[in-house]
Amino acid sequence: MRKIRVMVVDDEPIAARAIAYMIEQGVVNVEIVGLFHSGREAIRQVDLLRPEIVIMDIQMPGINGLEAMRQIKIRDQNVRFIIISAYQEFHYATQALELGACDYLLKPVKQTAFTSALYKVIQDIGARNDYLDYEMEQRERMELATPIIKKDFLRSLLPGADASACLISCAAFLGYEEKTGYVFVVEGDAALTDEKMQRLLRNAELKSNCDITLVQQNQAVGFVYDADDTSWLYTDGMCNAMPVHMGIGGVYKGTLQMRLSCAEAFLAVRQLRSEPYADNARHLLFSDATAVKGESEELYIDRSQEIKSRQDIIEKAEYYIARNYTEDVALEDVAAYVNLSPFYFSRLYKSDTGKKFSEKLTEVRIQKAKEFLRQPNSSIKDVAYSVGYNDPNYFSKVFHKITGMTASQYKEG
């Protein structure tokens, strides 16, 4: 196990050695990296020794302990301080704590009090290091997963792909839900070699806001986000006079709209390969391909179908709530049922219904409670349990908040 690095700073050599002795006798997994007798000396050595804990006296000649703390924190915000001082004045303790001191101990310090204070700081550092390790591990996983999810996102855009839920989840993970952008399709001629296609993919990937993937041996699909300028595709030499045709869809905002842009890109490629373009052009914006306007329904879903797919998600979620409201239903349960991430489902549901998921669940439960309360032999306690509330008192509070009357008043009315 890695040892925690500790620096001791006290202008009295005997006091500094006494602190070091208490550390050696009572604390494990700690390494004393230096004993110093002035604030200036401690500041000078911080960058070299990189202590994680500094045990500091306040009253020292020259730069005192409080000023030394300020300057050390400028060099390393993560250093923790324990102050040991013969001065019990309130303003010293206040300033030390304001500067981030973890503890303020008065001399002479007893071994038990000192060890306890030091172990608290060590545990805090351990917890922070565990969190940093976890964050690093998550970042590494994200770095591994992101290229795969980008490919899934692009493949979910393709004509005929029955993958709205996958598209929505991938877009949420990548942060593309509200992006403005467009899709382009590159199709190679027979003369296009694998080497040239790979070069084209690398050229596209050099643009920071472009995702691209190979969907067939001679066909690639790309998505450009946070942009409406398409000129870079044919003016920056991305294709380098390669034997390819490139179709560019319209600029849209929102995840599902990107499927329409993709359909337009495919139609533009198809138009390039027909009259009057034939081999005379290599790039075509869908907006310029007047002959194929309105044909997106042939290859793809139209906008009404895109809206319908969102409605299907909402309807499916509300069906789940209606069937399971008596249970301990969580947002994560419903999100899993509709095959979306909890984060994106929560945003989509609020955006499309104007209500939070929890509000809808409460609404269903209270409506059902009203029906049960109208029954002659029903008790408020039994009704609470039957609509998913384990605490009848909490049920009564919720019922009053929603309806403006108590459950008893409603039953009697």
Image (tube, rainbow, N blue to C red):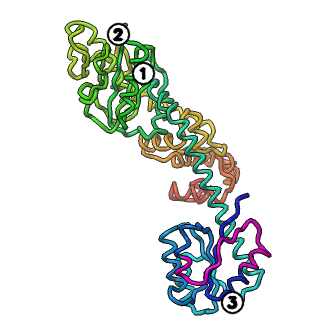
Q: Amino acid at mark 3?
A: Lys
Per the model, the C-alpha gap separating discs 2 and 1 is 14 Å
Q: Position of residue 221 (x, y in %)?
A: 39, 23
Badge 2 element:
loop
Q: Which residue is mark 2?
A: 189
Density class for disc 2 (Cα within 10 Å; few <14, some 14-19, many ≥20) is few
Q: Amino acid at mark 2?
A: Asp
Q: Amino acid at mark 1?
A: Gln
Boundaries of the magenta span: 20-42
Q: Residue at x 49, y 47 (%)?
A: 356
Mark number displayed over residue 101: none
Per the model, the C-alpha gap separating discs 1 and 3 is 71 Å
Does residue 304 lie above or below 294 as drawn?
below
Does residue 147 lie above or below 239 as drawn?
below
Q: Position of residue 330 (x, y in %)?
A: 61, 45
On the image, which quarter does residue 118 sit in?
bottom right
Q: Which residue is mark 3?
A: 107
Mark 2 or mark 1: whose residue is earlier in sequence: 2
Badge 3 element:
loop
Q: Position of residue 222 (x, y in %)?
A: 38, 26
On the image, which quarter does residue 209 sit in?
top left
Locate residue 327 relative to residue 355 in the image: left or right: right
Camera-side residue: 36 or 359?
A: 36
Q: Residue at x 51, y 55 (%)?
A: 403
Q: Position of residue 25 (x, y in %)?
A: 80, 76
Outermost residue toward the right? 25
